[in-house]
Image (tube, rainbow, N blue to C red):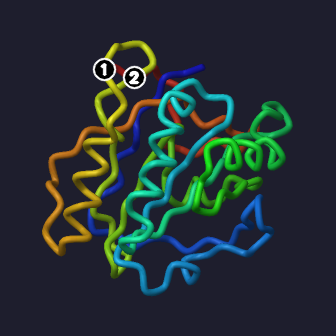
Amino acid sequence: MVQTASTMLPLGVSAPDFHLTDVVSGTPISLDTFTGKSALLVMFISVHCPFVKHVQTQLAQIGRDYEPKGLGMVAISPNDIEKYPDDAPAHLQALAHAEGFNFPVCCDRSQAVAKVYTAACTPDFFLFDRDLHLAYRGQLDDSRPSNDKPVTGQDLRQAIESLLAGTDVDPHQRPSIGCNIKWIAGNEPEYFTGVRAEE
């Protein structure tokens, strides 16, 4: 595992569209799915990554707390499922059921969605406003599997609260840290360096 940080896509960019399928319901998912939402959270996750395992219950809680308030959410797994079969759709479906996710979970088999979002690690978070402009990209909170800090979701929650309240999100944001996305051989994006991130 290469410990990797977010690429920190420039704030204000428009959300790239995508067309994937929810592994639980079989429903097609795209940006149009979230029309009318006050904000949209796009998360890149993995079943096997210890950084995601560390926060997955908090992700479920964020869904329960904010979906009724107008937040759209989608989780996308971009890993190479041939080399990492634990991230295959059946395992994503099991994770969604086990944690009670109330948002779609999709498998990005081609890794095209991860690339267009410049996703680099799992977990990686991209929060867009009602006009689908990027307002937050960065860490969930300061907790990591290697420290004793509680998982609160504080950083991401503050950004969500700001958007839902119609106020500006603090532009001073810390990158997420996680497992590198497991790129298909020969499909690595230019921004993937394989260099271990420093916290």
Q: Residue shown at 46%/29% (left/top)?
A: 4
- Above or below 64: residue 142: above
Mark 2: few/some/many CA within 10 Å (<14, 14-19, 20+): some
- The residue to which callout 2 is attached is 144
- x and y percent of residue 120 in the render? 50, 41
- The residue to which callout 1 is attached is 149
- x and y percent of residue 182 in the render? 67, 35
Which residue occupies the foreground of this view, 76 or 190?
76
Location of residue 150 (image quadrant): top left
> Residue flagged by tag 2: what amino acid is it?
Arg
Q: Residue shown at 71%/67% (left/top)?
A: 20
Q: Quadrant of the N terminus?
A: top right
Dot label at residue 62: none
- Above or below 68: residue 97: above
Which residue occupies the foreground of this view, 67 or 139?
67
Location of residue 110 (image quadrant): bottom right
Q: Quadrant of the C terminus?
A: top left
